[in-house]
Amino acid sequence: MATAIQRFFLSDKPPYSHIADLERSFNPKVTFKKVSNYKLKASDYIHFGFLGSVFLFVLYANPAPLFYKLLFYALLCVLFIIPVTSQFFFNALPIWAWLALYFTSSYIPATHRPKITVKVLPAVETVLYGDNLSELLAASTNIYLDILAWIPYGLFHFGAPFVVAIILFLFGPPTVLRGYAFAFGYMNLLGVIIQNLFPAAPPWYKILYGLKTAYYGMHGSPGGLKRIDKLLGIDLYTSGFENSSVIFGAFPSLHSGCSTMEALFFSYCFPKLKPLFIVYVCWLWWSTMYLTHHYFVDLVAGSVLSYVFFQYTRLYHLPSDTSLFSRWSYSTIEKYDMNKMNPLLSESNDIENVPLSNLETDFELNSMGERSTSPSIFDGATSTSRSSATSNTSLGEFQNEYVGASPRVTSKLRFD
Amino acid sequence: MRQRSSHLPKTFLGCLPLYIGVDISLGVTIFNKCSGAYGILALFTGHPLEFMQWVMYLWSIATLCVYAQGLFQKHRPKLLTFSQIFVTFSIDTILTCLFTLWFTHSWYSLEGSSKENSSTGTSDGIQEANQGASQAVEYGATLFITLVSLISKLYFNFLLASYVQELLLHPKYMVDQDDVEQDLKHQRPWKRWWIKSQKICYKFSKNLLA
């Protein structure tokens, strides 16, 4: 079995390549050595400063005994220090911060919380999207639609992050899982912060109470998932949602955010299956509205949040090549080069990239004189490239005139 | 060489290349435009659509198709496609403002006729009633989200204008009219119509931006 797995994943592993290797050491000295050699960048100060402040807030706001809170933080520190666990747990730091804040949210005293809005989301939904789409889609229900809605919302949503992480780890390039943990954690963390700063009632509230004012002591509602509990004869979603940590956290939808993040990462690593991932997000969007858990504007906000964090991660953290079979197939990791991929930048030594308006297009043939020479197979090393062999125009003439479309003209040439 | 307008943004948020901004603008707008499909899906629940809703939802689906092209061409843009996206986006910005005004009127005329603004009435009374947002906060937050949405759309529109302007001035993306005409002869009618619309948008963009 082990041999078969090894053959399946390692058959095309490049010789002498160690980038996909995992840390197997239990010696904390390895971590300390790495930390002492690491030079902190400005972005690291922001990253660790922000997450540190979230952990400090949780330490202050969570009502658990101080001893247990410190014990939990100590356990996390141990996991971060031991190299074999550190490679997974430390990179998931934003996820830990999100979970810590999420489970502390319900303990923030109501006197310190912002006022709950009940009209903003239905109003914005109508103003921006023409109607209460969520209400309309939930207007007609039946058992088949209930099950169809429950599958992505009540099942896939909770299992998908783990499945996606495992698949990305095995079949994506090395470091892609790290990027996924970063983007997924930050998206959820910012989502929970927004939900706490802007408490808003979900659609089930409007169905149960109309547009009456809300208060923090109210219980949540499972919305349409109550029908699933009834169908299956269980009390899973009813008790779960009634005691939810963020009852008035409709905006943004983290169900939408998570599914979009999963779809974006999968589309990035497996682009041929992109339509399938788009269908999954659309399916989850519909089910979220059908089960009266979110307004359409919440779904858009969740997906936009994911999209922005994914783009940031893609530009600064993710490997640019995702075309190979598994993580062990890669020999090098290259990050996305924003300037190299910029379609508005062009090859500085390509004559085609000089605007016609800069060229002398009204010259007379007679005035060309000796400069007009046909290319010859006898041209030596001093000969110009084929692209400029028929041209009497040198890019050097335009260095001062044309910098917009080809900024690299002014920089050092590649073959200097 | 003609002078470029100095009013358009040359970078995204002052530090990132324009094409990244265009990528994000199109992605965010596409998420919003999905509302068209869900609006029409509401028909299946037995809810009739008003004329303005039909117009808005069908327009949203049409624009979604136009904008999606841009995401497929983000690293190898075609001037004709991006001209079409720019012109569609500009019309869309104007229409979005009009739709917003129309549906704002619809919402507040509907809300004005309903009288459901009382408290949920609990035993703990006054303190719990104070935890709900006042009318002013509700209006303010609604106005804020709506304005942020419209201002973002306007900014995205300027980003696209700037991007199309750069493409117009870039020799690499010059459109060969003969090639386009030649290409048209071998296409299906709907594709011919699509490319013709791109050509019209290209001419409009060139007159406006180049």
Image (spheres, grey):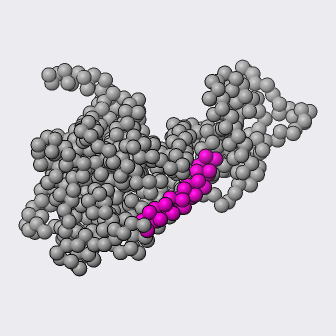
**In the rendered structure, does residue A145 fall within the stretch colored magenta?**
no
Foreground residue among A118 and B17: A118
Image quadrant holding the C terminus of chain A, namely top right
Report the residue at 32% width, 44% height from top.
A140
Report the residue at 19% width, 21% height from top.
A4
Task: Identify whether B23 is placed above or below B144.
Answer: above
Q: Which residues are magenta?
A: B87-112
User: Is residue A261 something one can see in this rendering?
Assistant: no
Residue A6 falls left or right of residue B84: left
Residue A119 falls left or right of residue B36: left
Residue B30 x, y percent position in the rendering = 48, 46
Report the residue at 37% width, 49% height from top.
A136
Foreground residue among A218 and B196: A218
Image quadrant holding the N terminus of chain A, namely top left
Magenta span: chief secondary structure: helix
Residue A150 x, y percent position in the rendering = 24, 42
Residue A101 falls left or right of residue B95: left
